[in-house]
Amino acid sequence: MNKEMRSEKINILDLTKEELTDLVVSLGMKKFYGKELFVWLHKKIVRNFDDMTNISLKDRNLLKEKTYIPFFNLLKHQVSKN
């Protein structure tokens, strides 16, 4: 996905639990999904909407369309000998 397309989407990790709830309600989703999303993102550290199995496929696809989860790939891991 290019940078221009991503800038139109909402970085979902920037949102508080209350903001997530407001977002899902504004998208026509069930209010309790705000709490569910918060748990997936901040307690279970899930970075793929497809892994959020207690959210309907239709709603996961809507989230993919309107938001994104920033993800950083670890390129190199170094451990000190000390």
Image (tube, helix red, strand yellow):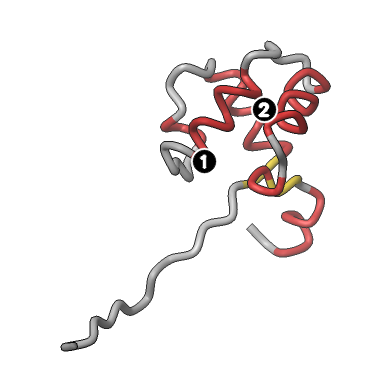
Query: Which amino acid does the dot numbered 1 rest on?
Result: His
**Along the line of sight, the residue nearer the viewer: 18 or 3:** 18
Q: Is residue 35 left or right of residue 27?
A: left
Total numbered circles:
2
Q: Decide: is 68 above or below 2.
A: above
Query: Which amino acid does the dot numbered 2 rest on?
Result: Leu
Quarter of the image for residue 5 reads: bottom right
- The residue where tag 1 is placed is 42
Say which residue appears at 80% left-offset and 25% top-offset: 22
Q: Is residue 79 left or right of residue 7?
A: left
Residue 55 pos. (x, y %): 52, 18
Q: Quadrant of the N terminus?
A: bottom right
Q: Earlier in the sequence, mark 2 or mark 1?
A: 1
Say which residue appears at 51% left-offset and 35% top-offset: 49
**Along the line of sight, the residue nearer the viewer: 25 or 60:** 25
State the residue lying farthest toward the bottom: 81
Q: Residues within 10 Å of mark 1 (few under 14, many from 20)?
A: few
Q: Is residue 77 left or right of residue 19?
A: left
> Considering the numbered disc 2 on the image, is that residue within a helix, a strand or a loop?
helix
Residue 76 pos. (x, y %): 33, 79
Quarter of the image for residue 78 reads: bottom left
Say which residue appears at 60% left-offset and 23% top-offset: 35
Quarter of the image for residue 62 reads: top right
- The residue where tag 2 is placed is 62
Q: Residues within 10 Å of mark 2 (few under 14, many from 20)?
A: some
Q: Quadrant of the C terminus?
A: bottom left
Say which residue appears at 77% left-offset and 33% top-offset: 19
Q: CA distance from mark 2 to mark 1?
A: 20 Å
**Along the line of sight, the residue nearer the viewer: 1 or 63:** 63
Residue 61 pos. (x, y %): 60, 28
